[in-house]
Image (spheres, grey):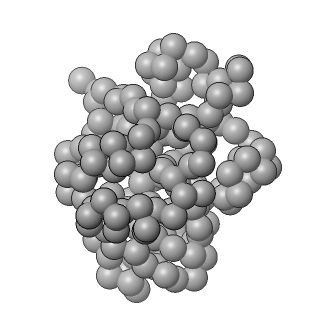
Amino acid sequence: MINLEEKFKQANIDYELYHHRAIYTNEDALVVKEEQGFKGTETKSLYLKDKQDNHYIFLTFTTKRSDFKKLSKLVGKRLSVVSAEVMEETTGQKSGAVSPFGYETQVPVIIDEELLSHEKLVFAPGRPDQTMVVKVADLKKIIQVLDIQTYLLPMEG
């Protein structure tokens, strides 16, 4: 994993980084968020793959169900969730603490367009004992700095 804190500092991207006990569930995340006092929209990053074993990250709301038909149509390949074991082997990250950004190899990110209407995004930067908060307004800059291929999953309606 790339050190996001260093990358963001070098690029003058505002971020907040919180250190806390390990979080693996949405319930834990809410308790820690309350204790630490950070603000923003909770997100989850699903680690996906296609039949050729190309990987993708889907960045969406923690509570939102994923529509794999829409995701697959968007990227033009059938996508499925990578098993926790394979994900941990490939990324070194545990389920529930997957980062949307910062991979050594190119991993395209599919962003739920609905997230863009929020002010700040809360995510695990690849470690269950850390939480990072970034401004949605800085998302374009983050994508440029990290040179990430992105897809935008359109909102419903």
Whether residue 117 can be seen here: yes
Locate residue 81, reporting x and y percent. Answer: 65, 36
Query: Which residue is situated farthest in the front direction here?
Result: 10
Residue at coordinates 60% horizontally, 57% vertically from top-left?
1
Locate residue 19, reporting x and y percent. Answer: 49, 81
Locate residue 35, reporting x and y percent. Answer: 40, 86
Whether residue 40 can be seen here: no
Residue at coordinates 50% horizontally, 34% vertically from top-left?
108
Locate residue 84, reporting x and y percent. Answer: 74, 49
Foreground of the two, 87 or 64? 87
Residue at coordinates 38% horizontally, 38% vertically from top-left?
111
Query: Which residue is situated farthest in the bottom direction here?
Result: 35
Residue 16 against residue 79 in the figure, above or below: below
Please tell me how many numbered marks the rendered image carries.
0
Q: Quadrant of residue 25?
A: bottom right
Foreground of the two, 71 or 147? 147
Q: In which quadrant will I find the C terminus?
A: top left
Residue at coordinates 59% horizontally, 67% vertically from top-left?
127
Foreground of the two, 113 or 29? 113
Q: Is residue 58 left or right of residue 114?
A: right
Q: Is residue 27 left or right of residue 92?
A: left
